[in-house]
Image (spheres, grey):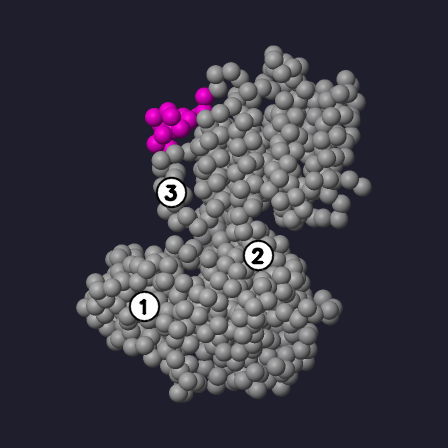
């Protein structure tokens, strides 16, 4: 069985069908590419073949390149291996594009069309772009585009060069630089594809049989001019100046892929098409050899996928959720109800008052209405999803629920009461999960008659947008509960990590020190703009002060008070609390109050609030940018290492994926462990030792990291490609 097969019809059309055995989605491997190459040769050489159609045997066309193969090319052959691999692909696609034409007259080629039944991403669009006409099924669920930039690379199989020449740099920018995906109709409107039809295979066959002179691509015709202007054209000049500024504004220089992409486009636009492809391949190799892209592919694709597929699921039978009971229909409960109902799960949404339960259900209606206005959701779908949510105050409705997710107030007494009330009704074997963000699972489990069936399923806000779910295993939590939580997360299409029970679990444990370090810097008189920019220039999506404004300062105060009460004299964050409590006293509770570390106008964030300067005057000597960056990054990364040392994390893959998806840890690094590996343990220890000596024991080097520095080890080297702590 091969990835591509060819069938030659009596009508003179050779249909090449892409259908990778054993996979639900086609991805391109080097073997697959070689087969395709051979079939194209055969079809071009066969006089009985008048035209060729490339299609898929699956519902979708293709999901892209097999990123494991790209990672493998790099490991096996280094830069030369990557470059040679990419050039081999260019040759195949160029052969399709020229289709046997006479190189001088450009005549005599055989028409080749692509017929896309559904989604076509990455190489799944780059291959069609090399054909002469692209037909897509009228399938609004299909996604068409080049999302490579999202995992730290860029379209390197001609997509960059072809799309720029097809649409012009300006019009191609959202697809190349932002990885924008479109449904077929929008893709046609944008010029990515040619036709949206009922039956793309039939339409493509009909087209190849009548096509004659319209095979030569504009860029192969003498005198071709780039749409929108090449770099030295006045309009092109403006485009490239603007694009450089935009890329730098968005990436602040930390994402190598965006800059390399722009270089490939700029340099490619100055030369002929084949030279441009070589330039694209060079820049692609350059990006792939940058540790950032390797780390991003590893965390955001390979390991994220592995975790979603249940890499850490205990070996117990299927625990798919059929009916979930959600206790508390507030902000979190309402969001959890929505994502569950969307995943075909029956939902019982309980609150203390009927109005509150109804309000929770109305949240789903609101999101679905938004979907309808954007034409992503139909009225029928809305009715169907809302029909799955029963909003009630009646605990008896929980009978038959195989999973409970509790999301009532963060108060142990209230949680204990609802746990008992629910357990009185639910089946004996139901799993009970709490969405607490701060209370230890072991403590809450004391209210349960079945602690081995009690677990933490910690969502992030807003639930419909945030992809990470942290599953927390209490000391007595059993394997079935873990499996159920993982199966639930898979059903609602989110990414799980499984951690052990400890204060703040994993994500909040690392994010709170980041916010606190930002606030400490304010207390020290460091310019808040320097603090915020230092974080963003390291690739953090939000500076610490913006982040605390977004999550609200009163929540910070609440957490600080609870932590202090729990830790007593060991509590280390007095300096932070001075600022935080003062802000709360001023009524500056963050974005929701239109007043926080930032000033706001009608909900819109302005500059840093002027009043901060009066209370915390700026120090005459401001620290170096790098010093501030080291403080903000190390305070998170060292905490991640401690979480691993303490056994809260048991798998560094989860530590890295969880950090990026949970709190936006600089994605270009591939996560805190990937970042420390990039720095090297020895250099990391040197920096942390300096920080600890200067700023205090919160930067103390964990023994594990020091040992790794002594032995010259890296995290992924030590814990293996599977990331497990215990090898
Ligand atoms: P919320 O105040 O918006 O909602 C809590 C809901 O629980 C309210 O609707 C309330 O009426 C209901 N409730 C209270 N007592 C009840 C009872 N006895 N029976 C039934 N319903 C009852 O709070 P939230 O932000 O949705 O947080 C809920 C839980 O999720 C908390 O444990 C919180 O720590 C956790 N959490 C919150 C976030 C966040 O960002 N807000 C993130 C992760 C986890």
Residues 86 and 665: in front is 86
Q: Quarter of the image holding residue 526?
A: bottom left
Farthest residue toward the left?
614
Residue shown at the point (29%, 68%) measured from the top left: 522
Residue 130 against residue 710 in the figure, above or below? above
Instruction: Determine whether the residue tagged by mark 2 lies in a helix, strand or loop.
Output: helix
- Give the crowd class for mark 3: few <14, some 14-19, many >=20 residues within 10 Å: few
Residue 695's spot in the image, x, y percent?
A: 36, 73
Residue 560 against residue 616 in the figure, above or below? below
Is 497 covered by the magenta stretch?
no
Residue bearing the label numbered 1:
521
Farthest residue toward the top?
105
| Position of the N terminus by quadrant | top right
- Give the crowd class for mark 2: few <14, some 14-19, many >=20 residues within 10 Å: many
Mark 2 or mark 1, earlier in chain: 2
Q: CA distance from mark 1 to mark 3?
A: 29 Å
Is 236 covered by the magenta stretch?
yes
Instruction: Determine whether the residue tagged by mark 1 lies in a helix, strand or loop.
Output: helix
Q: Are marks 3 and 2 in contact (CB under 8 Å)?
A: no
Q: Quarter of the image holding residue 144?
A: top right
Q: Is residue 506 left or right of residue 473?
A: left
Looking at the rendering, the stretch of residues picked out in magenta corresponds to 225-239
Residue bearing the label numbered 2:
299
Residue 403's spot in the image, x, y percent?
A: 62, 72
Secondary structure mostly taken by the magenta-highlighted segment of the chain: loop
Residue 562 seen from this side? no
């Amino acid at each position: 069985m091969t990835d591509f097969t060819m069938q030659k019809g009596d009508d003179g059309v050779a249909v090449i069908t892409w259908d990778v055995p054993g996979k639900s989605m086609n991805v391109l491997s080097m073997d697959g590419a070689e087969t395709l190459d051979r079939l194209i040769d055969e079809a071009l050489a066969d006089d009985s073949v008048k035209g060729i159609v490339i299609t898929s045997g699956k519902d979708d066309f293709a999901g892209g390149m097999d990123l494991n193969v790209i990672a493998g090319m790099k490991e096996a052959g280094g830069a030369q291996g990557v470059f040679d691999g990419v050039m081999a692909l260019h040759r195949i696609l160029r052969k399709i594009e020229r289709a046997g034409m006479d190189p001088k007259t450009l005549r005599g080629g055989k028409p080749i069309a692509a017929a896309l039944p559904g989604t076509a991403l990455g190489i799944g669009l780059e291959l069609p772009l090399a054909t002469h006409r692209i037909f897509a099924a009228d399938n609004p669920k299909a996604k068409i585009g080049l999302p490579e930039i999202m995992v730290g690379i860029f379209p390197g199989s001609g997509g960059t060069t072809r799309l720029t020449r097809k649409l012009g740099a300006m019009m191609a920018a959202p697809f190349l630089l932002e990885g924008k995906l479109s449904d077929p109709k929008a893709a046609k409107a944008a010029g990515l594809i040619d036709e949206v039809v009922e039956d793309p295979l039939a339409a493509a066959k009909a087209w190849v049989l009548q096509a004659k002179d319209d095979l030569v691509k504009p860029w192969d015709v003498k005198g071709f001019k780039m749409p929108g202007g090449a770099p030295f054209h006045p309009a092109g000049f403006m485009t490239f100046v603007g694009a450089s500024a935009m890329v730098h504004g968005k990436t602040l220089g930390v994402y190598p892929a965006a800059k390399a992409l722009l270089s490939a486009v700029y340099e490619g636009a100055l030369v002929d098409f084949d030279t441009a492809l070589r330039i694209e391949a060079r820049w692609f190799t350059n990006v792939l050899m940058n540790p950032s892209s390797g780390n991003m592919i590893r965390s955001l694709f390979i390991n994220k996928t592995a975790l979603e597929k249940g890499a850490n699921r205990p070996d117990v039978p299927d625990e798919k959720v059929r009916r979930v009971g959600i206790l508390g229909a507030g902000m979190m409960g309402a969001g959890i109800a929505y994502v569950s109902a969307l995943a075909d799960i029956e939902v019982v949404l309980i609150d203390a008052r009927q109005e509150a339960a109804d309000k929770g259900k109305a949240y789903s209606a609101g999101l679905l209405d938004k979907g309808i206005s954007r034409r992503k959701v139909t009225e029928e779908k809305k009715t169907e999803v809302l029909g799955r949510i029963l909003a009630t105050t009646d605990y008896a409705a929980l009978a038959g629920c195989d999973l409970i997710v509790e999301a009532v107030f963060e108060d142990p007494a209230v949680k204990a009461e609802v746990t008992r009330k629910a357990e009185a009704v639910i089946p004996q074997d139901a799993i009970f999960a709490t969405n607490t963000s701060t209370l230890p699972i072991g403590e809450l489990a004391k209210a349960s008659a079945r602690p081995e069936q009690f677990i933490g399923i910690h969502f992030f806000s807003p639930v419909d947008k945030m992809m990470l779910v942290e599953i927390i295993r209490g000391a007595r939590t059993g394997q079935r509960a873990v499996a159920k939580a993982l199966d639930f997360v898979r059903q609602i299409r989110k990414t799980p990590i499984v951690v052990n029970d400890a204060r703040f679990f994993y994500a909040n444990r690392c994010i709170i020190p980041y916010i606190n370090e930002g606030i400490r810097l304010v207390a020290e008189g460091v310019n808040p703009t320097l603090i915020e920019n230092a974080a963003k220039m390291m690739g953090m999506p939000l500076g610490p002060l913006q982040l605390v404004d977004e999550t609200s300062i009163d929540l910070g105060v609440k957490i600080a008070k609870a932590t202090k009460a729990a830790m007593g004299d060991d509590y280390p964050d007095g300096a932070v609390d001075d600022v935080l409590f003062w802000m709360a006293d001023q009524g500056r509770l963050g974005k929701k109050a239109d007043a926080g570390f930032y000033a706001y106008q009608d909900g819109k964030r302005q500059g840093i609030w002027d009043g901060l300067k009066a209370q915390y005057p700026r120090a005459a000597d401001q620290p170096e940018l790098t010093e501030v960056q080291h403080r903000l990054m190390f305070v998170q990364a060292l905490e991640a290492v401690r979480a691993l040392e303490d056994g809260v994390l048991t798998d560094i893959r989860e530590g890295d994926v969880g950090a990026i998806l949970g709190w936006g840890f600089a994605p270009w690094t591939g996560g805190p462990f990937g970042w420390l590996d990039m720095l090297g343990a020895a250099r990391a220890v040197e920096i942390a030792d300096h920080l600890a000596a200067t700023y205090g024991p919160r930067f103390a080097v964990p023994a594990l990291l020091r040992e790794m520095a002594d032995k010259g080890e890296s995290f992924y080297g030590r814990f293996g490609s599977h990331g497990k702590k215990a090898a």
